[in-house]
Amino acid sequence: MIAGDGNLKLTNGNEITVWSTEVPVQSPNNSVAVLLDVGNLVLKDNSSGDILWESFSNPGDTFLPGMRIGINLKTGEKRFLISSKSNENPSPGSFVGGVVAESAPIIEAFIWKNGNRSHWRSGQWNGVKFIGIPQMNADYLNGMGLLSNSQEGTWYFTLNDFNNSLIRFLYVSPLGSLQIINWDEGSNDWNVGLEVPDNECDIYGACGPNGICNKDKSPICKCWEGFEPKSYQEWNRGNWTDGCVRRIELQCDKINASLASSDGDHNKPDGFLKLSGVKLPDLSQYHKPREITEEGTEESCRVWCLNNCSCMAYGFVTGIGCMFWTGDLMDVQSFSYGGEDLFIRVAYAELGTIYIYTHL
């Protein structure tokens, strides 16, 4: 109903308000509710035509074409998807999906569980797709985009169906999966075209800090070269949450601790281990290059990282540029196809036994 104050209200059988739009209305008698052809339910002033409230700005578990989800850093507004408790109970569930800009211009999509615990991560947006979802092909990319305005501090993910024959929407299930659901004219029914997470390695941080996950290997977790399990006992039990630690201290750490030796390999500079075809870690930061070119080069990124002791790893992705990491590397996954190159800082003494590992 539209109440006396002009707001749209949902009441139960005892006329107790269950939900209300709760927006300021200057002319309550002029309020009307309209369901638009695109699926947007709006409350508007029928005289002026001003929209007072709209469902597209207050999403539930479904993301329709024409909607925006994202953040406004200046106002603090967040438009996230919220799962239902179950297929039978539409009240808010345990999972929230949205996009974040932890280090502009680096944008990622997340699903969080129980408020703030990371459940799944898309990988970084390269201007065309999320690079941590290798199965995102041209069919899924059609119409997907990111609208950003660094001056206004806004970052919104959009879905627009320019191809009228392609009918689809995104959905966060009660179990925490993000699904792209398409209309199949052949079967005259909806079907799930893409669903993430879809394996153990898609779950955030499956192998702990500095571990890499490969769904096609057994066990699925391993430490990359130069690292070893933090707890061999727990690792052998299949509990990988503690992750991996370095075998040999970095030269940077020795210099900072005034422990550098003047002979042997102990005083030689650190190097990099290259992992190919991987999902780049979480908490990436953007390095703005000094070059005239907007993104810089992979070589300039490597030199910069090597000369900065806080840089533990770097990656260079077309469409983003130079990214680096300063702490433990979390949520790295090996793909059978696709993925990016990750360069991990290791001690010089490890370089003699390190090779270029592709698809670990």
Image (cartoon, rainbow, N blue to C red):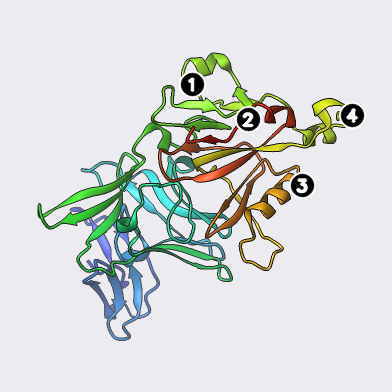
Mark 2 or 1, nearer chain start: 1
On screen, residue 316 above or below 296: above
Which residue has dot 3 on it? 307
Q: Nearer the viewer, residue 261 or 178?
A: 261
Seen as rendered, the residue at the extreme bottom is 47
Front position among marks 2 and 1: 2
Which residue has dot 1 on it? 239
Q: Which secondary structure lies at badge 2?
A: loop
Front position among marks 4 and 1: 4
Residue at 22% over, 61% down: 167
Q: What's the mark number on residue 262?
A: 4
Q: Where residue 220 sits: x, y (%)? A: 44, 26
- Left or right of 29? Residue 76 is right
Q: Quadrant of residue 120?
A: top left
Which residue has dot 2 on it? 354
Q: Quick check: marks 4 and 1 in contact, CB under 8 Å?
A: no
